[in-house]
Image (spheres, helix red, strand yellow):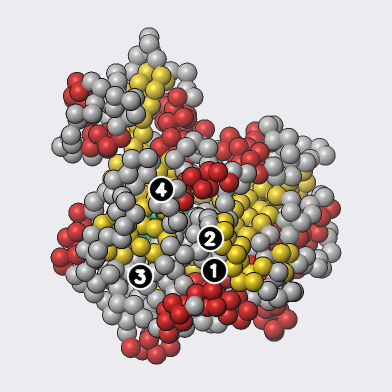
Amino acid sequence: MSIEPPSRPEIENLLVEARTFAPDPAFVAQANAGPELYAEAEADFEEFWARLARERLRWTEPFHTTLEWDLPFAKWFLGGRLNVSENCLDRHVENGLGDKVAYHWIGEPGDRRTLTYADLLREVGKAANALKELGIVAGDRVAIYMPMIPELPIAMLACARLGAAHTVIFGGFSAEALSDRINDAEAKVLITADGGWRRGKAVGLKHHADEALASTPSITAAIVVDRIGGGVHMVEGRDYWWHDIVDRQDPICPPVPVDSEQLLYLLYTSGTTAKPKGIIHTSAGYLLGASFTHEIVFDVKPDDVYWCAADIGWVTGHSYIVYGPLANATTGVMYEGAPDTPDWDRWWQIIEDLKVTILYCAPTAIRSFMKQGEAYPARHDLSSLRVLGSVGEPINPEAWLWYHRNIGHEKAPIVDTWWQTETGAILISPLPGITTTKPGSATFPLPGIVADIVDAAGQTVPRGGGGYLVLKQPWPAMLRGIYGDPDRYVQTYWSRFPGMYFAGDGAKRDSEGYFWLLGRVDDVMNIAGHRISTIEVESALVDHPSVAEAAVVGKTDEISGQAIFAFVILRAGVEPHDTLAVQLREHVAYVIGPIARPKFLMFTPDLPKTRSGKIMRRLLRDIAENRVLGDTTTLADAGVVDVIRDKSGSAEED
Ligand code: WT7
C-alpha cells in the first residue's frame, strides 16, 4: 500500500489564523459531560467502560469480564446477556415513557407519522413475530433494502428482538450490489418496499430487489412495504406484503436475551479491493458506544428534539438515528426525501415546525445549502437549535463558519465528529460543554479513546506534524472483524502498524494537540460523505464490453468534497465518443448505484504506470486537479503523462 498524507491548504491557512470558539458558560453549566470523564477513563479504561455498561444498559445476566483482548480480536462484557431492542424500547415503556415520541417521521410528499415508544414497541413486536413465522431465529441474517420510512428502524429492531442480525443495504445501491451483499451475508429474508419518494417522484425499489433475488439462493422470503402504491409484481410463495404478514401478528413478542458478543448487524463498506467488507458489530459494546457518545457529544436531554439527517443505510443512521437515540429514549426526526424538495428550505421548515434542538448532518449538505444562499435559512425560525453536528468528511472552515452563523446563529456549538463504519461510534469530537473548538478540527479523542498520529515507521509524530491516524486501545463499539474473512481484518486494519488500528486517514496535530483530519490516504474516495473505492468503480467500468482498462481517482469538488474522475482506455477498434462516455457513466451507476456514477470521464490511449505495472494514481490525481505534475521518474513511459495531460481539458462533465 502506498500512502501519502494529502495536504489541505485551507486548513494549513486556518492553523495560522487560529480562530477559536470557547463554550458558552451557560451551556457549560448544564452540559451532560464534565471534564472528569477524561480523567476517569485515563485512570482505568476498562473500569470506566464497565461502569458505563452497568449503568447504561439493562442486563438479563450481568457480565463477569469487561474485556478479553487477543489483539486484534476483542470481546467485551463477557458472560453478559441482554437484548438490544429491549434496551431501546421495553425499558422506556416500563419507565413510563410509552407516550413519549420516538420518531416524528415526515414523508417527502408531506405525509407524517408520529410513533411513540409504545407504538414502536408494538410495531417491532409484530414485525418480529412475522420474521419468526418466516423461520427467522437467533443467529440468522436478514437483509433490509428500504427507503427512509418508519418500517426501516422497525425492521432492524425486530431482528434484534429475535437475536437475528440485519444487514441494511442503502436504497441507492444497485441490484448487483444488493445481491452481492445478500450472498456474502447468506441472508434468509429480505425486507424491502415497493419504492420511496425522492425529488417529487416515486422511485421504485422492488424491481431492483427482484433482479437481485434471481441470484440469491439463501433467500426464502421477502416482505414488501407498500409505500408508493400502484402495485408491484409479487412472487407467489416468496413475497409478502408488510400489511398482510406483519399487521395480523400479535404485538407481543418476548425479547430473546443474547450474549454480549452476539452479532447485531453487518454493514458493508468499501475497502481497497473490489469486494466490499461486511463489518461486524456485536450487541452490548456497540449499544454502549452508540448511546454513550450520543448523550455526551450531542448533550442530549429528555426534552430535546434530535435530528440526524443521514440515511439509515449508512453507519451514521444505524448509530445515531436508531440505536444511540433509542437507547437514550430520545425524540427523533426522520425525513424521507431530498433537501431541495419542494424547495431548498425544506430542512429549515422541518426544524421550525418540530422545534428541532439538535441537528447532525454532513459537510456536503452544508455546502449545498451554502451555495443556495442564506436567504433560505433566514426565512425560518431556527432559534430552537442548540447543538449542531458534522460527520462524514473533513468540514472546511468556510462551511463550518456558515453553519455556525446561518444555522446556529453563533450560539449553538458545533461538534465535528470523526468516526467510521468500523469504529461503530464517534471517537474524535469536541464535547460541547467542554471543548474550545476550531473550525475544521475534530479536536480531541473522546474519553476512553486513545488515538495517535504516527509516521511511516509507526512513531508518534510530534505536535505540529502530520501522519497516519491510529487507535492504540480497543473500545467497546469497535468492529469485531470482517464477516467470513478474519485474515482480511488483520491485514486491512492491524498490519500496517503492528499493535495499532490504522484507520486509513491522514491527520495532523497542531501545537495545542488538536486533531485535524486530512482525508483518506488509501485508494478510497469520499463522495458526499460516502465511501467508495477506486477499484470498485474501475471494475464496474472494465465490466463494460468497450473498456479495456480504467483508472479512477477522486477530484476535489465544491459540493461533494470529492467527485469521481475516471480515465478509460477503450478496447481496440472502439472509437471514443460522447455518447459512449455517457453510457459508461450510466453503466457504473447501474452496476454499483447512482452515487458511484463518475462525474468526469476521460478517454485516454494509455495510463501512467510504474515499472512494476502499478497505476500511478498520484499523477492521475494531479491531472484531475489540473496541478503541476510531480516526479515522473518511476513511470514506464513518461510520454504517457503528456498525452493524458494534453487531453485532460476534454474530460466529460455532468
Ligand atoms: C471515513 C469513514 C462515520 C460516519 C460517516 C462515514 C471520513 C468521517 C469525518 C470527520 C474528517 C471524516 C474519514 C473516515 N470522516 N467523519 N468528522 N472529519 N473525516 O463513515 O463511510 O465509514 O467513512 O469518513 O475519512 O475514515 P464511513
Badge 1 crowding class, 10 Å Cα cut-off, few under 14, some 14 to 19, many 20 or more, is many
* Viewer-side label of 4, 1: 4
Q: Which mark is residue 190?
A: none
* Viewer-side label of 2, 4: 4
CA–CA distance in space, label 2 to label 4 = 18 Å
Q: What is the three-letter code of the residue carrying label 4?
A: Arg
Q: Where in the image, quadrant-wise, is ligand 1 located?
A: bottom left
Q: Between disc 1 and disc 2, whose residue precedes?
A: 1
* Viewer-side label of 1, 2: 2
Image position, residue 563 (x, y; %): 34, 42
Q: Between disc 3 and disc 4, whose residue precedes?
A: 3
Q: What is the three-letter code of the residue carrying label 1?
A: Gly
Quadrant for the N terminus in the image: top left
Residue under numbered circle 2? 478
Q: What is the three-letter code of the residue carrying label 2?
A: Met
Image position, residue 424 (x, y; %): 52, 60
Badge 3 crowding class, 10 Å Cα cut-off, few under 14, some 14 to 19, many 20 or more, is many
Does dot 2 land on a helix, a strand or a loop? loop
Residue 290 visible to an observer of this rendering: no
Q: Which mark is residue 444?
A: 3
Marks 3 and 4 close (CB-CB < 8 Å): no
What residue is shown at x 52% (from left), y 33% (from top)? 591
Does dot 3 land on a helix, a strand or a loop? loop
What residue is shown at x 58% (from left), y 46% (from top)? 486
* Viewer-side label of 3, 4: 4
